[in-house]
């Protein structure tokens, strides 16, 4: 953990815009397929500064923007993402003239946008790090993963990159924090800039005032997913959460604007 801590860079600008943060979950998939350049463009056009997205690896070793390991849900084809080359994935019809895109294409197409990237499989670690380095995007991305080994391996390749807690580190912190800010909580969250969490986990409410305050005491932010109802957005912002991960970035941005 100490090694990870040393890689947190004060130069990263991922969290430099003023809070609260609206993270467009897979872009803005209103009249656009999720996780496509069109969905990202719609989110940016609505005013989003942050895109939350996911990456797998293609057959030819390219970091490809995709949430699911297979094409079943998004394209109705029973084949895995890693069984197709990037060129083949680009030709898949996802609707509205969109196909899969490489992470490098997304970073290049939206050079002023910050990307929150969830690394979905081990094979995507090195291609994802390479794409981020090649686009000189370390200071405008946050890399994370539900799996701690994947998260740590990606961070290891990107000195100074921002990162949020994996599921294992978050659960450890959640259980420990119920009894106060202990050394175990500090260790669980060292080297991170945020925890990105659901409202409940393990039957426990995460978004309590006490938990939010403890996260802030440790110098971290709390981003909550996936919140699509304006009333819930307002409630969470009233509690002090720092970011809302949402399928409806357009609605969330209106909520934030109304509170300014």
Image (cartoon, grey):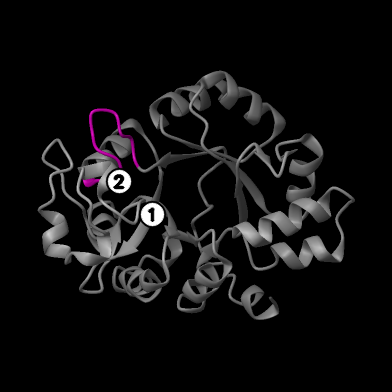
Give percent across and percent down for residue 25: 41, 41
Label located before the other in sequence (2 or 1): 2
Tell me, yes or no, if residue 103 can be seen here: no
Q: Is residue 34 magenta?
A: yes
Marker disc for residue 54: 1
The residue drawn where x is 31% and y is 39% is: 44
Give percent across and percent down for residue 27: 34, 41
Give percent across and percent down for residue 210: 82, 40
**Mark 1: which secondary structure?**
strand
Q: Is residue 160 magenta?
A: no
The residue drawn where x is 58% and y is 75% is: 7
Q: Which residue is mark 2?
A: 35
Give percent across and percent down for residue 35: 30, 46
Region in magenta:
27-37
Asked if the residue at tag 1 contacts the one at tag 2, i.e. Cβ–Cβ closer than 8 Å, the answer is: yes
Task: Check the picture and name the quadrant holding the N terminus.
Answer: bottom right
């Amino acid at each position: 953990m100490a090694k990870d801590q040393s890689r947190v860079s004060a130069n990263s600008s991922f969290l430099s815009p003023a809070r609260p943060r609206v993270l467009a979950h897979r872009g803005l998939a209103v009249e656009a397929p999720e996780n496509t350049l069109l969905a990202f463009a719609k989110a940016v056009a609505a005013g989003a500064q942050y895109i939350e997205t996911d990456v797998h690896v293609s057959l030819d070793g390219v970091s490809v923007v995709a949430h699911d390991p297979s094409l079943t849900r998004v394209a109705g084809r029973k084949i895995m993402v890693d069984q197709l080359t990037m060129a083949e994935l680009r030709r898949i019809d996802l609707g509205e003239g969109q196909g899969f895109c490489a992470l490098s294409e997304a970073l290049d197409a939206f050079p002023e946008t910050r990307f929150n990237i969830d690394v979905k499989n081990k094979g995507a670690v090195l291609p994802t790090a390479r794409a981020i380095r090649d686009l000189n995007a370390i200071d405008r991305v946050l890399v994370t993963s539900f799996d701690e080994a994947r998260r740590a391996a990606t961070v290891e390749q990107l000195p100074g990159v921002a990162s949020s807690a994996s599921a294992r580190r978050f659960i450890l912190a959640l259980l420990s924090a119920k009894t106060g800010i202990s050394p175990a909580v500090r260790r669980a969250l060292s080297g991170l800039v945020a925890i990105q969490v659901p409202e409940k986990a393990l039957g426990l409410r995460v978004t309590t005032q006490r938990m939010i305050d403890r996260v802030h005491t440790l110098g971290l932010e709390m981003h909550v997913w996936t919140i699509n109802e304006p009333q819930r957005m307002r409630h969470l912002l009233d509690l002090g959460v720092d970011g809302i991960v949402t399928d409806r970035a357009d609605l969330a941005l209106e909520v934030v604007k109304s509170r300014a």
